[in-house]
Image (cartoon, helix red, strand yellow):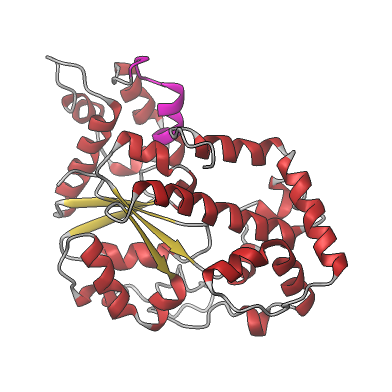
Amino acid sequence: MPNPYVFIVGCPRSGTTLLQRMADAHPLMTVTHESKWFDKRWVVEWFDKRRGLTPDGFVTPELISRMVDHPRFSRLKVTRDELSALLEASQPVSYADYLSRIFDLYGQRVGKALVGNKTPVFVRRLHTLHQLWPETRFVHLIRDGRDVCLSAKPWSKGPIVKDKFVTSKDDPIATVALWWELCVRLGQQAGNLLGPRLYYELRYESLISHPADECARLCTFLDLQYDDSMLRFHEGRTTTDPALDAKRAWWPLTPGLRDWESQMPADEVEQFEAAAGELLDELGYPRGAPRPRAEARDRASRVRDLLAQDPKWSQIVRRARRGTADPAV
């Protein structure tokens, strides 16, 4: 089967690391974390801009130099000679085929034939990835946006709230709400075009409450036999160090880590739902403030208008649409 076999995607802070660890525990499949060696910038941006590639998308020696020099790629512990050996001297090698060979090499090193990747923000680049690998499957993990908001607010590595967008500082809740909405909708719109053979949606809440059932359904989508080792992903790794959060401590499945109903102030719930309540309704998530006040609705509308004019926001939308002829996406 061709690698990369599957991409796990979703709005950041939606639990994709948990799902990645569960999938990686399957005896036949490994799923790399984006912080290992697979970097979103050199996968899609180098392809978009043809960095180290010919205009037709074939690999040049420059690409190997870029990879060797990339700080994250060095974690794969592959030498320049090994990367060069993946090129066939007799004929050109496409970028997609070359990366597939690197995935294969990684799988050989960990003793698993199927190799996937978890990079949450790829939820906005499914068309580009599908253009590269037409048979690769995508698993879109969706989580209640209010719990995503609780997780994103103190997120030191993600400047969504602090300074990423023009509205982040003055209206952080509405900004996160619309950011969550954008990520989910872009993933779903791409999924509608990909179809059920290649695209699968999974709810975080159901994964936590019914892990065996959800993992079994996921394995069916991936044409794999379910193995309960997926539920034991944490064994031998969990630590009780109180200084570590659940992710770094490798906790097992733990319900209630984020609970907007008990942990989110009422005014923030209203702000979030005024901005993204329509998507919450579509996804079947119950409202905490079914009728946001006019002030909250006006504020959300103003934030939406400002984001539409924000170059950073517009760039995300443009890149997501790249690779599809459907103007609605």
Q: Is residue 209 above or below residue 115?
A: below
Q: Is residue 202 left or right of residue 168?
A: left
Quarter-of-image position of residue 17: bottom left
For image coordinates 18% across by 23% down, the residue present is 87
Res 173 seen here? yes
Q: Position of residue 130 (x, y in %)?
A: 34, 40
- Assess whether residue 53 is covered by the magenta stretch: yes
Q: Is residue 324 above or below residue 29?
A: above
For image coordinates 45% across by 32% down, the residue present is 325
- Assess whether residue 236 is covered by the magenta stretch: no
Which of 180 and 195 lies nearest the eye of the viewer?
Answer: 195
Q: Is residue 300 above or below residue 293?
A: above
Which of 102 and 131 lies nearest the eye of the viewer?
Answer: 131
Q: Is residue 290 left or right of residue 88?
A: right
Q: How many marks?
A: 0
Res 166 seen here? no
Q: Position of residue 132 (x, y in %)?
A: 32, 34
Q: Is residue 275 above or below residue 320?
A: below
For image coordinates 79% across by 75% down, the residue present is 267
Q: Position of residue 167 (x, y in %)?
A: 77, 50
Q: Which residues are magenta?
A: 42-56
Find the residue positioned furthest to the right.
295
Q: Is residue 75 left or right of residue 312?
A: left
Q: Position of residue 260 (x, y in %)?
A: 63, 78
